[in-house]
Image (spheres, grey):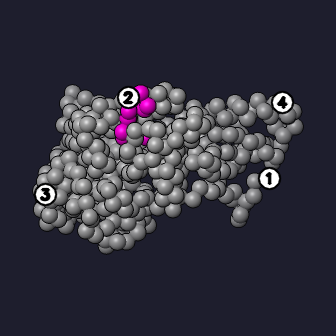
Amino acid sequence: MNNYYQQDIETMPVEKIKALQSERLVKQVKHVYDNVPYYRDLMIKKGVTPNDIHGIEDLHKLPFLSKADLRDAYPTGLLAKPLSDCVRIQSTSGTTGRRVVAFYTQHDIDLWEDCCARAIVAAGGTREDVCQVSYGYGLFTGGPGLNGGSHKVGCLTLPMSSGNTDRQIQFMMDLKATILCCTPSYAAYIGETLKEKGYKPEDNTLKAGIFGAEPWTEEMRRDIEKSLGIKAYDIYGLTETSGPGVAFECCEQSGMHINEDHFIAEIIDPDTGEVLPEGSKGELVFTSLTKEAFPLLRYRTRDICVLSREKCSCGRTFIKMSKPMGRSDDMLIIRGVNVFPSQIETVLLNEGYPPNYQILIDRENNTDTFDINVELSSEMFSDTVKDITNREKSLSGAIKTMLGINPKVHLVAPKTIERSEGKAVRVIDKRKLH
């Protein structure tokens, strides 16, 4: 059965989608050029004006935006509307102190919630459903986005936020939740906890799950489907482009449809910036066509993936993106949180440690493990075992303050972290994510 939230748009012929994108792009470029001095300067540097953009075929002429630009323009340098027109911000967990702050007008929020509603309906959601939103609320986009989408579909919404698993399970059982929205690792954890409490998959009323915000494998999908007795759907988004709902999976579960009436996707060579033909593996770039307050043009996501226009059995005509297959920068996603090695380095230096460390990530029982080995300086090495234990605790706390998640810190003897060509291998990620 094919379910659509906005059928005319989701099944629009490709030529019509492209015509709509062209019309919206021309308008958006003018809006940004007129209202965002930061991006206007980038266009002037590149020798391009709004008059050079007649449609999507001219998109490649525009300059890219990167995370570094967002940091430079923080907090309001990329704002395209007066603050008095904005009704909300959302934010990421910040790299080296500068967070990404995205602004929304009421119109932006409405369109974002439409995108999330499409994802819920594609997973079989209707107004008869009970949608349990167990993504974090607050500055994180996961909770607010799916909460709004669930309202638009007309589901009974359980705004649980993350954590407090006993309460999650109580509400899930008592209020007969049918759709669960959270990170895949939390879904796996709920599944394990249900089993420990003596429940079988058929004891719950769930039928579908919408899981995103961190990488997960097909094996993990099958495990979750089995442990909760559901069909598990992927969802993709970033704070910079609004949040979850930029792309979502349909019943085919073979990649995520990008909401092309709101976003243009390109794949580029991460080294040269050259646009690659459809079907090539490269870095995903997004242009927001309908955002008013914080419209990013050609934003480099650093996610590596493939786009495909192959006909989909669900009837949607939107292009599909594969699951991200890695990153073109050094960002790690651990338990749904964005982590840059440079953040850990900053904490070590602030706390008086040499920046010789190694991050070890693995996945046990579907949950990421996060260990950091840190070399002691020779002066510190003479400390007693008790001192070292206290140091480990205090450093772990300082890193948690920076990242929002708790690592296990192990202080090791000087020169014990292996170095290749004089450099320590910073990250050992043993999770099998593809």
In front here: 412 or 142? 142
Boundaries of the magenta span: 172-183
Please identify the quarter of the rendering in which residue 155 is found.
top left
Choose the circle earlier in sequence order: 3 or 4: 3
Mark sitting on residue 416: 1
Give the Cα separation between the discs numbered 2 and 1: 54 Å
Would residue 421 appear left or right of 363 to someone viewing this image?
A: right
The residue indicated by pointer 2 is 175
Q: Are marks 2 and 3 in contact (CB under 8 Å)?
A: no
The vertical placement of 81 against 52, above or below, is: above
Choose the circle earlier in sequence order: 3 or 1: 3
Give the Cα separation between the discs numbered 2 and 4: 49 Å
Mark sitting on residue 267: none
Choose the circle earlier in sequence order: 2 or 4: 2
Query: Circle 2: is it few (<14), some (14-19), or many (20+) Cα within 10 Å?
Result: some
Give the Cα separation between the discs numbered 2 and 3: 42 Å
Where residue 372 appears, as percent x and y from the top left, is 68, 45
Query: Circle 4: is it few (<14), some (14-19), or many (20+) Cα within 10 Å?
Result: few
- Identify the element where label 1 is drawn: loop
